[in-house]
Image (spheres, coloured by chain):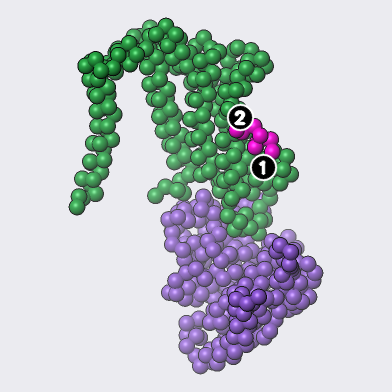
Chain colours: A purple, B green
Amino acid sequence: MPVAARRGAAIEIVHLRKTFESGKNSVVAIDDLSISIAPGEFVCFVGPSGCGKSTLLRILAGLEEPDSGEVRIDAAEGGVRNAMVFQEASIFPWKTVGDNIAFGLRARGMARAQYTARVDEALRLVGLSRFRDHYPSQISGGMKQRAAIARALVTDPAVLLMDEPFASLDAQNRAILQAELANICEQTGTTVIYITHSLEEALMLGDRAVVLTAQPARIKDEVIVPFPRPRDTIEVSATPMFGELKLRMWNVLEAEVLQARREHEGV
Amino acid sequence: MKSPRAERRRQRILEIASPVVFLLVWEAVVRLGWLDARFVPPPSAVVVRFFDLAQSGELWKNVSITLFRVGAGYALGVIPGVAVGLLMAMFKPLRYVLDPLVAAIYPIPKIALMPLLLLAFGIGEMSKVVLVAIATFFPVLISTYAGAANIENIYVDAAKNFGAGASMMFREVIFFGALPQIFAGLRLALGTSFLVIVAAEFVSADSGIGQLIWTSWQILQVDRMFVGIVLIGVLGVASTAILQEIEHRLMPWRRR
């Protein structure tokens, strides 16, 4: 079964550095970033827009190469190392929900007889069982992101990578999906790296919230999120502790946001 | 304000009435002697001649040979056009090699190649089939390439992240992502294929609709000529409708 089959992987990121060439000048996106992540940990990276947090995720996903430094994912041999949930709708419009979810399994050479049960299980996990044969154009934005989550989870990844997956949803849908995601991750025990610019989201979902500096991304501050699991994301967000942590993180983040804004407007 | 249903009915009536009125006016203008029937025959004469030709078997002989040339040439041009377009989008070196060649050959009116093809393949069927193939290859290649090269990165990234190899990327992501553009190219190529086959049959054929039109003109049988012209129009409309039906079936995710 896909869920709770294996504990997530430990991740070691060491002195990571990445620059992009744009015209004549090069932009440092990530500079000397190091962090260790425990197996099964849910880590949220928060930072101002354009600080290079998506680049960090793309390096972890193997879609970009770092200039220097290293990413070690301590995953079991042969298993799927990581699976990504993207910010915008990334499920294939020309495949049904079920075929989208089966994509990662088929890419790894699994036959239909083997994956059907796993796809059904993943559909059930995200509450889309009735929509297996629907095309993405026939379902809502929230359902599309749930399908994207199922497509990632069904491969039983050692690390689940999420890039602001709920940013384009309305507030109510976002709250529902956040609660569901917390629940699913508690069940599966996957290690999760979650990128967001929302402090609330980081505190609701994460075991640890990491504040990144404005470009280039470095680690500025870390908060160990004290709320126990299983966690009710809505209830947690109404506690005084939540407010205090949010304020502390905002004070750290504000300077970075202002700096990011100056860099955008100035020069 | 009209209800949407009344609006639709009005649309249907106008769509049917417009060609009918056009034919009636044409008929009337010729009968009244405002147009010379020797140059522009009335529609009724064209219809009579149509049935004559159908009965003698001459009609079907010409239609079938033209359809064969168009069909065979279209298949021979369009299938490699799609394949090469996708490959150009996927493999940069191939793109660098083919881009200048395509840019140079595409704007040449393909009918200009007819003498060359006659030299190479003789006056038989092969020269016409190859002409249609060349004429349809380029529009399909160009729109397939444009469609495949402009697929949103996120689908390619997602497929890569989920471990898709080159073959799966090609067949399940790039191809389907480019499919709407591929069909735009197929529709363009269909028009082009009738254009070049009629021109080719004018100059070098002893059968086919183009030849029917050309010989009718030479012996000033204008009503026969009009039968040929109308036939080309009908075949164009019918083949476009078939292509649209295929498009509709191949892209169920675009249905609403």
The residue at 47%/39% (across/down) is: B247
Magenta highlight range: B100-107
Q: Specify few, some or many for label 2: CA neighbours under 10 Å numbering under 14, 14-19, or 20 or more.
A: few
Give the image location of residue A66, x and y in percent. Answer: 76, 67
Q: Amino acid at mark 2?
A: Ile
Residue B219's place in the image compared with A11, above or below, is above
In space, the residues marked 2 and 1 are separated at their CA atoms by 21 Å
Circles 2 and 1 on the same chain: yes
Q: On the image, numbered disc 2 is attached to which residue?
A: B108
Q: Chain of mark 2?
A: B
Residue B67's place in the image compared with A65, above or below, is above
Give the image location of residue B222, x and y in percent. Answer: 37, 12
The residue at 24%/32% (across/down) is: B17
Q: Nearer the viewer, residue A37 or B225?
A: B225
**Count of labels shown?**
2
Q: On the image, numbered disc 1 is attached to which residue?
A: B88
The residue at 45%/55% (across/down) is: A137
Q: Do labels 2 and 1 touch, CB within 8 Å?
A: no
